[in-house]
Amino acid sequence: MRQWFACSVSVLAIALLGARPAPEEQTHVVFVPWKVLRPGTAPPRSPLMLFWIPASRQELRRSELLTSEELARYAAQCVAMVVVQPDDHVMIQSLRVDGRFPMVLLADGDGAVLAHLERESGELSAAEVEAMVRTAMDARAAQFDAVLDDAKEKAASGDTEAALVLYRKVLEQRCTCPRQGKDAQRALRKLASR
């Protein structure tokens, strides 16, 4: 009873004094795990790599690309986030870019450029980069959905070996395409139990 009374008095005091309760949602900042390459250092190996070449050190310090929640989610899906310094001529040459910065490139694990954005002046917005990566990830998911459909047809027609190869190919990409990877894993278990 005493506890109830103390709680009621507290609520009444807050109401009378006009105090407002703390907001339920507190804002939080998500940092993208960018890896800054030193000149002469090879980029990390990953199924997908997002290369950001900022125009200056100031851009690198204050860009909204540093705190993009969506880019942080893509990093968790095996998209390596790599910053290439504008004076790293060897890496820039290996990416086959002409030197107009800032620039962002999305490449696959073999280094083939899938998409890119560049600016002749100003900074790249996080929304632009997010949309570019989202489009590429959606295309990748659609590609592996097609592989799953092909594997299912092969399994249904009795070509189990070909189906296994395709399902394993999708399973290898489960980090970038988690739903497709789970579907492939289930299908492999089902084929193994036959």
Image (cartoon, rainbow, N blue to C red):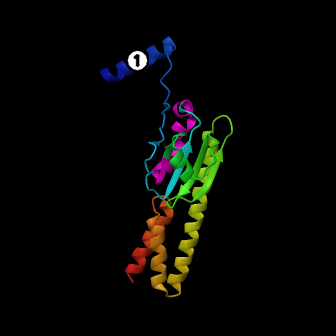
- Asked if residue 1 shows in the view, the reply is no
* Residue 74 forms part of the magenta stretch: yes
Count of numbered tags: 1
x and y, in percent, of residue 24 in the image: 49, 30
Residue ID at (56%, 77%)? 150
Residue pointed to by mark 1: 10
x and y, in percent, of residue 83 in the image: 50, 43
x and y, in percent, of residue 192 in the image: 38, 79
Determine whether 156 is above or below 10 in the image: below
* Residue 88 forms part of the magenta stretch: no
Asked whether 40 or 30 is in front, the reply is 40
Left or right of 52, for residue 186 = left
x and y, in percent, of residue 152 in the image: 53, 78
Residue ID at (44%, 14%)? 13
Place residue 9 in its image quadrant: top left
Magenta region, mostly helix, strand or loop?
helix
Left or right of 135, for residue 109 = left
Residue ID at (43%, 52%)? 44
- Amino acid type, label 1: Ser
Left or right of 87, for residue 116 = right
From which residue to which does the magenta span run? 58-81
Residue ID at (40%, 20%)? 8
Asked whether 32 or 11 is in front, the reply is 32
